[in-house]
Image (spheres, rainbow, N blue to C red):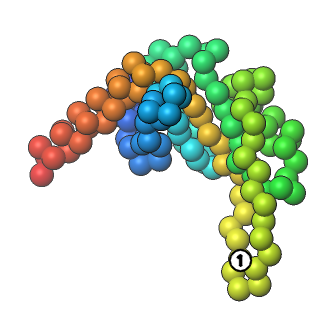
Amino acid sequence: MSKRVNLKLLGPLIYWCEGTRSVRQNRGNPVQIEFVSSDPLLIKLFLNFLRSVLKTKEDKLRGRIQIHENYNKEKIENYWSKISGIPTSQFQKPIIKRRKISYRFTYNVLEYGTFIVRYGSKEKYNELIKMINDLKRNLLEMQ
């Protein structure tokens, strides 16, 4: 199986599992593909899919980190920029979580937080959703 064929299957599959489904068009915001993960491999795979299968434009890709308030924002932005290939100049304002102290619960703290990939395009969003629906249909036919 070729690399391109794998991405045509893996891209829609991981978006189906990890992607954001909300369409924000009704609030004046453009429809966008949004994918969130703390796993560098999933981020790389999904971005390879966007770039090689959906043929997205590099200047429209956006990145955003989600971290706790005591994290080093610059270090983490540089880490995800290196992983994603998205320059930090295309990163949006980070989401900073204020940590509430709790003695009853422990938190699973991620060293590099989570990374959000965004791409604003109704056309590409619809293309991706069609691929997911085709995948679902094929899986149902296998049963």
Look at label 1 and name its amino acid. Thr
Asked where in the image residue 119 lies, by quadrant, the reply is top right
Asked where in the image residue 107 lies, by quadrant, the reply is bottom right
Left/right of residue 71 with respect to residue 114 in the rendered view: right
Residue 77 location (% of width, % of height):
79, 37
The structure residue drawn at horizontal position 44% and vertical position 41%, both measured from the top left corner, is 22
The structure residue drawn at horizontal position 75% and vertical position 36%, both measured from the top left corner, is 93
Q: Residues within 10 Å of mark 1 (few under 14, many from 20)?
A: few
Placement of 40 over or under 101, stated as above or below: above
- Quadrant of image for the N terminus: top left
Asked where in the image residue 47 lies, by quadrant, the reply is top right
Residue farthest to the bottom, as pictured = 104
Provide the residue designation for mark 1: 106
The structure residue drawn at horizontal position 31% and vertical position 36%, both measured from the top left corner, is 132
Residue 118 location (% of width, % of height):
57, 31
Left/right of residue 5 with respect to residue 43 in the rendered view: left
